[in-house]
Image: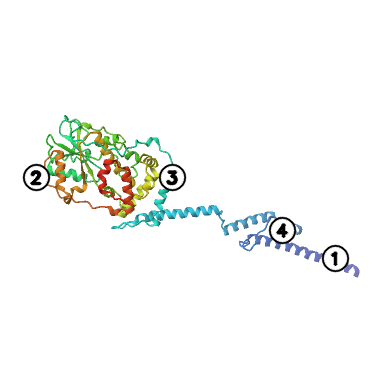
Amino acid sequence: MSPSQSRRKFSLQTVFLILTITLFGICLFSSFTHVQVIVQFDNPKSKLLGFKPTPSDSKTIESSLHQFTNIETTTAISIDTEKSNRIDEELIPKKQPKHKKDKAMKQQENKKERKHGNNQKGKMISSAILEEKKSSEKTTSQTLDTALVELMTEEVNPRLDIEVVNTSMTFPVYDNDPYPNAAWPRLAWLMSFPNSGTSFSIHAIRKLTQLCTGTNYVHESKDPHPTPIMASSPHGPYWIDLKRFPIIPEDSYVLTKTHCDGFCNANAKCKVQKYMINATQFQLGCLGQKESKNNTKNSPYSPELVARAIHLIRDPLDNIVSRFHLTYKKFTDEQKVTFTNDAIGFQAFCTKMDSFQHKSDKEGILTLFHRHDINATDLINIPCWSDFYRYVSWHNNAFQVKAIMHLPSITVYYEDYDESQGWNTTVSRMLSFLKQNASKTGKIHKFKMGKSYHDYYTMDQQLAIWKLIKILSLVDTWEILKRYAIVA
């Protein structure tokens, strides 16, 4: 081989080697670039560093790689881009739209306010003096106030509308029995709103005379086989404790207990249909008609059996608290913790019952508004307002029924049983009205005057209660209640 041929061969080998090295370098560079792209896309900090590839960036990278190599990159880039976006979303929480965020915060704040209001409601009362309500304790009342005011614009449901009672009406006084030729013994109703001294009254007359009294309620007869007072009325009324005491003589009246109707206790079952009743419905309750557990009603006894009535009265503020104390005895252990047997528990219980009335008895409240022209503000500051409505309505109906039946009647006040208030005069008056005499062996323990519960209410509440009572009362009802009234 000539020298010139040797030099040509060496040059070709050198060029080939250079080309090979160059191509190898290009391949190595392109592979390294692809890896860098994937690594940058996979880097969780890519967005935090300000790097986020756009679609145009991806196309540029893909085009450049294809210029130097045949490696397919489209799939790798698209997958890694999605992964990068997903990681970004996990690292940086989504921001809620401003209006949704504001709404959620407002709902949470309202929930906290309602909870705080309910927890603080009962704490406004001390055992001796009821403090004025604090602004933080008015949340529940303000909510109820708004609800009641809104109700004022709605229309009455005709199904619940009852004739309006003329509160200016008065009733005549009757001296003679309505049925002078009726058989003896005749009934003298002890008409009383529950927890106004009924049991003591019945017990006192029975012990002093050593004679039987009567009741509309079979479970109070104290006999395994209750005996009706009248043979002509087998379903009541019944003698009380007939085994221990003899039947009263002829020409005497049997003092017979009746709560009539419309007095249901403040609870979830005491809906307006049970207490917003007229005089006719009330009279049926006085005559022993009552609803059984299967929603059926028994037949009332004849009004001709009733000859007169003793109307028992107690201070409404004390009467309503006394009903709460009776209800307390039926509470579960858990309820007794929530509704303690004191002023704080009473206020808490009333808040619960008033809330139920406002939420679940909407039609009843509407009817009450339209029937008596009562404003929402008349009810806001009255604990257990529906119980005070029942109290006044009950006595209104009692006066109307006595007038309908032409019954001679006397009024006895709970406080009159106290020795300092003329116990002997009160009992003598009752016995004379019943045409009975005290037995020589008859004895009765002194009456223990129940305490006054006015300190269970704030002064503002007392004034609001008496305002409502005055609005609801008939003339005769107000005449017997005004001795207790507190006015501004």
**Residue tagged by mark 1?**
12
Q: Residues within 10 Å of mark 4 (few under 14, many from 20)?
A: some
**Residue tagged by mark 3?**
150
> Does residue 105 lie above or below 270 as drawn?
below
Task: Indicate which disc, 1 or 3, sits on the residue closer to the N terminus.
Answer: 1
Q: What's the distance in space between the residues labelled 2 and 3, CA to CA? A: 63 Å
Q: How many marks?
A: 4
Q: What's the distance in space between the residues labelled 2 and 4, CA to CA? A: 119 Å
Q: What's the distance in space between the residues labelled 4 and 3, CA to CA? A: 67 Å
- Which sits in the foreground, 9 or 295? 295
Q: SS for tag 4?
A: helix
- Which sits in the foreground, 236 or 144? 144
Residue at 35% in and 44% down? 268
Q: Mark 3 is on which residue type?
A: Glu
Labels 2, 3: front one: 3
Residue at 73% in and 58% down? 65
Labels 4, 1: front one: 4
- State the image quarter where residue 370 is shown: top left
Task: Indicate which disc, 2 or 4, sits on the residue closer to the N terminus.
Answer: 4
Q: SS for tag 3?
A: helix
Q: Residues within 10 Å of mark 2 (few under 14, many from 20)?
A: few
Task: Indicate which disc, 1 or 2, sits on the residue closer to the N terminus.
Answer: 1
Residue at 15% in and 39% down? 434
Task: Indicate which disc, 4 or 1, sits on the residue closer to the N terminus.
Answer: 1
Numbered mark located on residue 105 in the image: none
Labels 2, 4: front one: 2
**Residue tagged by mark 2?**
441
Instruction: Where is residue 203? Give x, y as percent.
Output: 17, 44
Q: Mark 2 is on which residue type?
A: Thr
User: Which quarter shows the N terminus?
Assistant: bottom right
